[in-house]
Image (cartoon, helix red, strand yellow):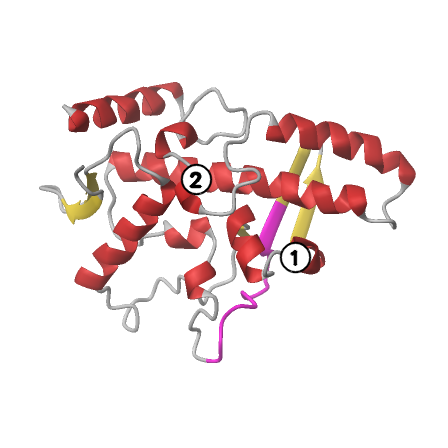
Amino acid sequence: MVRLKLFFNQENEVDISGLNNKSTVQDFFDGVDEFFTENPLPCDECKQNCCKGRFKINMDSISAKKISKGKVERIIPKLFVNAGENKLEVFMVAGNKKCRHLNGLSRCLIYQERPASCRTYICIPKSICYKILDAAIVAEMHHAMRAEFLDVVIKDRTTPPGAIEPAKALRQEIISTSVAYGCNNYNEILLKDCVRSDFAHSNVSQEEARLFHEIINREEV
């Protein structure tokens, strides 16, 4: 089977080859890591301030389990939460706060366990295929994190009784559409399952989903 790889296409965009219906999220992450090893970016000279800035990063259910050594409830209180109407957002860092997982030199202290939104981020031009995968993976992993958060809320003895049933209903709604909830490794999640426009939480349009699956089928021929 051809291995998933990243490369520079004719437009000098980061593109993907070797995609197929069995490609996993871990395959994609491995491809990104290998690409950067072979094409190191001049981060020390860059003015984008990627990891050193102040911004929101979606937390990732699998990353959260690894960072907390399987005890997600330990780090849930440390996550920034913004609950709006029919909405639950769980962040690792928010607003004017800097990421707590950077050392004094702004180097990542959890690089091997960093969230999907950090793993897929590339500050250089990307192909449409890469952009679709980036949006779909980050949305799916954050969707699963919402359910992980609600698991902790439901079990927490300090949660007001009136909030339990709404939390259970929202949790059930999330896990009914999530392909990542309950997974402990990225190799359990197929890329093709992340790229679905019918997911209510997805950042992928119908046209983008059609294009992505067309690319997969073309690569497998």
What's the residue at 72%, 57% (across, down)? 77
Query: On the picture, is 210 further left or further right than 200?
Result: left
Tell me residue 84's x, y (percent).
Answer: 70, 37
Q: Locate residue 195: give its quadrant.
A: top left
Quadrant hosting residue 196: top left
Give the alpha-carbon distance from disc 1 to disc 2, as whole Å. 20 Å
- Residue nearest the observer in this picture, 201 or 216: 216
At numbered mark 2, what does the secondary structure look like: helix, strand or loop?
Answer: helix
Residue at image coords 36%, 46% = 26
Q: Which residues are magenta?
A: 90-104
Q: Which residue is mark 2?
A: 188
Q: Position of residue 13 (x, y in %)?
A: 19, 45
The residue shown at (43%, 40%) is 188
Q: What kind of residue is marked 1?
A: Lys
Q: Which residue is mark 1?
A: 71
Task: Check if residue 15 falls in the magenta segment.
Answer: no
N-terminal label among 1 and 2: 1
